Amino acid sequence: MTQAIRIHANGGPEVMQWEDVPTPDPGPGEALVHHAAIGLNYIDVYFRTGLYKSPLPATPGMEAAGTVTAIGDGVTDIAVGDRVAYATGPIGAYATERVIAADRLVRLPDAIDFETGAAMMLQGMTAQYLLRRTHKVQPGETILVHAAAGGVGLILCQWARHLGATVIGVVSTPEKAELARAHGAAHVLLNSADIPAEVKRLTGGAMVPVVYDSIGRDTFMASLDSLAPLGLMVSYGNASGPVGALDVGLLGAKGSLFLTRPSLATYTAKRADLIGSAQDLFAVVQSGAVNIRVNQHFKLSEAAAAHRALEARQTTGSTVLLP
Ligand code: NDP
């Protein structure tokens, strides 16, 4: 038997139930992974509430690290006993073990423990594609990063500094501002500030070439107004709610802006891209340029408490759930 969090209806954290489910056998191309740690991500909230759709009943979660305990026919890249991690759909990571397509698994370097692996794959590969592919951050650039003390945020701050960029972070409290500063943000603004005016002041009027905005509804316009002409608006999350419909003409009026709404799934759809992104992440973590901060631990059976903390903006850095 496997123990798993299951939801039978969308709703608040209370819909997550701790249940016994039969342990599945891996089919062709699949592997059974015994989880040592599971990563908590904001996308788990979107699937729980129903903002993102999945058939029910469902087990949330898109990220974990553990050991391969069985493989199906045709699996050649991954073997029983391998230490692996993953960050991918379909959901189902909030379980003591699960079956998953073997070509979505990445072998963990020996120096990276399971907790760190579970904490960093989804948020870290997101930071990788945002900084290295969506916009190739250049030394000397000044960039704007929302939720700078969060899971993705702390990785973005450190990695962007490592690339030679100046990070302006945005957070909600002075404590989070301190944390973002300690992880590479050169300037930190509280979200109560007039963000475009502060960006104007900090950049001597130049504004920024790229904004990484994971907040969505509450910050979208301020982000557009912080961009230099021809700047790139990267709207990659909806922690405050979806942005909704947009008058495309605004992009012209505000300076021939570019807009993208990227997702990790697209950037890692090809196995070569998945492996490339993971290797790039492992390299910055192992060199010490990026430190993965696992600032909260919860029992997997108490995932509801973890969701409450995440939604109440009480977490910083990454959070893991332990079976
Ligand atoms: P975080 O640790 O960043 O937690 C979310 C943070 O968002 C909060 O701590 C809070 O920081 C801020 N926030 C602002 N407004 C709200 C609000 N109304 N309710 C709750 N939080 C709010 O989470 P993750 O690192 O897991 O994810 C960050 C974002 O990145 C999410 O939006 C997620 O969906 C997105 N994401 C997108 C991916 C993609 O490929 N598109 C992949 C991975 C993540 P503060 O208090 O400082 O404002």
Image (tube, helix red, strand yellow):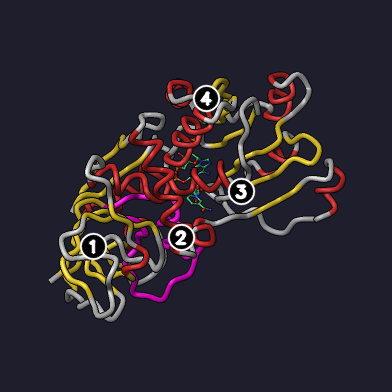
Residue type beneath disc 2: Ala
Instruction: Relative to 53, say whether 253 is above or below.
Output: above
Mark 2 sits on what residue?
272
Disc 1 is placed on an element classified as loop
Instruction: Relative to 22, say whether 50 is above or below.
Output: above
Residue depth check, mark 1 versus mark 3: number of the one nearer the observer: 3
The residue drawn where x is 53% and y is 48% is: 129
Q: Residue furthest left?
A: 1
Q: Residue 176 at what x, y percent from top left?
A: 45, 27
Quarter containing the C terminus: bottom left
The residue drawn where x is 47% and y is 65% is: 50
Specify whether 154 is left or right of 213.
left
Disc 4 is placed on an element classified as strand
Mark 4 sits on what residue?
185
Q: Quadrant of residue 110?
A: top left
Q: Are marks 2 and 3 in contact (CB under 8 Å)?
A: no
Disc 2 is placed on an element classified as helix
Q: Are marks 4 and 2 in contact (CB under 8 Å)?
A: no
Say which mark, if any, is on residue 134. Answer: 3
Mark 1 sits on what residue?
95
Residue type beneath disc 1: Ala
The residue drawn where x is 79% and y is 41% is: 230
313 or 90: which is nearer to us?
90
What residue range appears in magenta? Answer: 38-63
Q: Are marks 1 and 3 in contact (CB under 8 Å)?
A: no
Q: CA distance from mark 4 to mark 2?
A: 31 Å
Among the two numbered marks 2 and 1 on one chain, the one whose residue lies closer to the N terminus: 1
Among the two numbered marks 4 and 2 on one chain, the one whose residue lies closer to the N terminus: 4
Q: Are marks 4 and 1 in contact (CB under 8 Å)?
A: no
